[in-house]
Each structure stands twice: as C-alpha cells, then as structure tokens.
Image: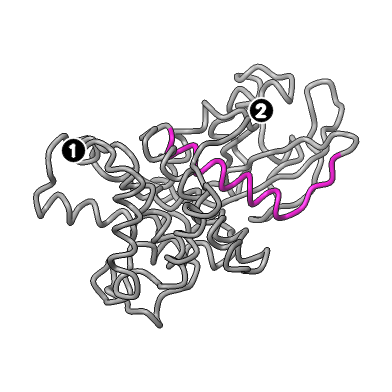
Amino acid sequence: MKLYEMYYFAFNKSLEPMLFADLNTGRIFDVNQAFLDLLGYAKDEVMVKTAFELGLLPGEDSQPLSIKTKNGSLKSGMVSANDLVHKEKMMRLMVFQEQTENDHFSLEEMLTQTISLISKISEFRDPYTSGHQKRTQKLACAIASEMKLSGEAIHHLSMAAAIHDVGKIYISTDILNKPGMLTQLEYQMLQTHVDVGYEIIKDFKLPWQIPKIISQHHERLDGSGYPKGLTASQIFLESKILAVADVVDAMNSHRPYRPALGIEAALEEICHYKGEKYDSEVVEHCMRLFINKDFDFSFSG
C-alpha cells in the first residue's frame, strides 16, 4: 500500500474537508464529502474545475487562504498541504480548516491536525493499534512531565506516540491478528513496521524530532532492539521514554495470542531490565507514577 493509498483510505471517512489535485495543472482528482458540503457544490460540478479556480493549491506547507464557494462567497481558513507520488505522478493533498470569527490558527494546530489524520489511518486499519497508541501517548507524556522535559519536547513526544505504530498498516492482518505465537519470519516482518512508519512520517511536514522518535522506539540500551541495534548514547531520550510506555501498555493489554498480563507484570518487566534495556531514570519515573500517583490509562470525557 503506497502513501497515497493510505491517505485515500481515510479520505472519504474524514470530517475534515480534503481534496486531491494535480500539483502543476490544478486538475482535481477527488474531493471528499466534507469539502463538498463546505463549497456547496455537487461532486460532478467540482470535478470539472481546477484547484486554482477554487482559490486553492498553495505551497507545500500550512498557510491561511480563502476558497470560493458555489455562491461566490469566500471561506477563510488554513490549508495543510502535502505532496504525494501516485503511479509516478505528483499530486497534492489539501486539508482545509475553516476559520470562524474567534479562531486563530497556528502552525502547531495544523501539525496536530496532520497527526490526527495519520492516527485515523491506523484506527481504520487496526482499532487495537489506535487504542494502544492513545494509551502509550498518555503514559509517555506523563513520564516526560515527571522528568521535567520542556513543553516543546513533550509536545513532540506526544505527537510521535500518537502515531508510533502507523507502520503496522503495511503488516498483514494475518500476522497482526494471529492467535498463536509468531514464527521467526513473521516476527521479522512485524519488525519492519518501525522502518515503514519512519518512511511514512518523514514525507510529512513535521518537526524532525517526530520521525526520529518513532524510528527508535524499539531500540534498547544494550543494543538488542531494532531496527538498527542502537545502544544507550545513540538513542534519543524521547524514544527511551516511548519505549517504556509502549512496553507497559502492550503487556497490560490483550493481544490476539494472549490475555492481558496486567500492570504488575508490566512494571516487573521494566524493573527487571532497568539500566540494561530500559533507561533507569525513565523506569523510576514510570514506577513512581503508578505506585505514588495512581496513574491509569483511562480517558475522561
């Protein structure tokens, strides 16, 4: 499945107005229902127009602009644009967020929307992965806060954690949902999700820390991790935090091949390998969250 196809997978289900257009000619390849509702057009009316006629096709970035509706009025907002290659053709995906009277958009808000879209792709493919990513995100950010990382670092970690397993969209469901233990070959195939996730994320206009965090979240201090077998000093701190949060939630959650092992087993695991596979400071702060601060994975609201 190509990057374009993964976008398209979530395209028609999204509540965000989205449109695919040719980068050079402005020819519209497809538009989702949310965009049609915004513009007031029927789909066949839009498909004979170009993105230029609608006031679209900005540079590959997030920026404010106004688009023309069928009745001639303008809708102001922010467009996040990403260039994708499909069948050797370059096209641009545009996601539009309308600006209401009291809205003030920022680049960070548009980045958050992009992360949300990628997360939805994972959710459509594998609901388990989505729930795991959200819980891991909550724990990773709590650990980072305990360690007093900067607000910017926690924000980058939060975005990375929210989509850290997106590469599993390439993995066969026969492997993801296998009720028994994986064979060595199947496990090797599963491990490719890290590199695949990195390849997906690096094509987005996101802070460089995000793909780096994702690419290292299965590395271990002693070099026993994957995909590169990095050791302690080579691993990004945020990746060390994500690694611990990832393991704790995975062990505490049901898997197709086993029931949930429980939080006690998860904490025993990270304590046993503290300083060997997992960063000691990260483990200590994680333990403190559960033992002294009654951390739990539930979400309010």
Write the residue at 74% across / 35% down.
54
Which structural element holds mark 1?
A: loop
Q: Residues within 10 Å of mark 2 (few under 14, many from 20)?
A: many
* Location of residue 39 by image quarter: top right
Q: Is residue 113 left or right of residue 255?
A: right
User: Residue 163: percent from the left, percent from the top?
Assistant: 47, 49
User: Residue 202: percent from the left, percent from the top?
Assistant: 48, 61
Write the residue at 45% across / 38% down.
121
Residue picked out by circle 1: 257
Q: Is residue 91 magenta?
A: no
User: Residue 226: percent from the left, percent from the top?
Assistant: 27, 66
In the rendered view, tell whether residue 224 sits above or below residue 250.
Answer: below
How did the renderer colour the structure?
A: one colour
User: Which residue extends farthest bottom?
Assistant: 233
Amino acid type of the residue that numbered disc 1 sits on in the rendered structure: Tyr
User: Which residue extends farthest right?
Assistant: 101
In the rendered view, tell whether residue 235 sits above or below residue 187.
Answer: below
* Location of residue 257 by image quarter: top left
Range of residues picked out in magenta: 103-123
Give whichever of discs 1 and 2 has the lower sequence position: 2
Residue picked out by circle 2: 35
